[in-house]
Image: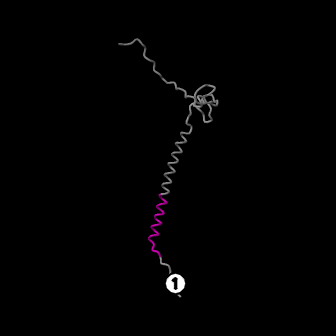
Amino acid sequence: MKSDRPAAPQLTYRERIPAAPHLTPSGNCSDCGVPHVLAGEGCYKVCPKCYCVLWHYDWFGKEKKLEEARRKQLEKTDKERRAAKLAELTKKKEESEKKPEEPPPKPDSVL
């Protein structure tokens, strides 16, 4: 059974939904640049010009990941450095144990 309705048009592109307004690092609205005010007993940050509730964008997420990677690399190099130092100390200790100790010199004459 064919319907008399025409086929739905094919979408060649999809409109992108604009990002919601958020707080900039300076504490302003990302859309209009006005400083936020507190609303709802201090629970919400609202733009007084465009009346939007501002959400907090994590500006430092990438920096946190880089810092974590740097910290892991430092821990790895620190472990390698400590292992090399321990091996060097162990080698010195073994060498010192292998050498026979010379007895102290005896006095030539006793008065």
Depth check: 42 or 101 in front?
Answer: 42
57 in the magenta segment? no
Q: Nearer the viewer, residue 61 or 52?
A: 52
Judged left or right of residue 11, residue 20 is right
- Residue 71 place in picture, x, y as percent: 52, 48
Check disc 1 and report the residue beneath it: 107
Question: In the image, residue 34 lies at what x, y percent?
Answer: 64, 29
Residue at 59%, 31% in the rendered image: 42
- State whether residue 15 is above or below residue 2: below
Going 51% across and 45% down the picture, which residue do you hit?
68
Q: Main secondary structure of the magenta part?
A: helix
Query: In front: 50, or 46?
Result: 46
Q: Position of residue 108 (x, y in %)?
A: 51, 86
Residue 52, percent from left and from top: 59, 26
Magenta-tinted stretch: 83-101
Query: Height in image: 51 above or below 81?
Result: above
Rendered-image quadrant of the N terminus? top left
In magenta stretch: residue 97: yes
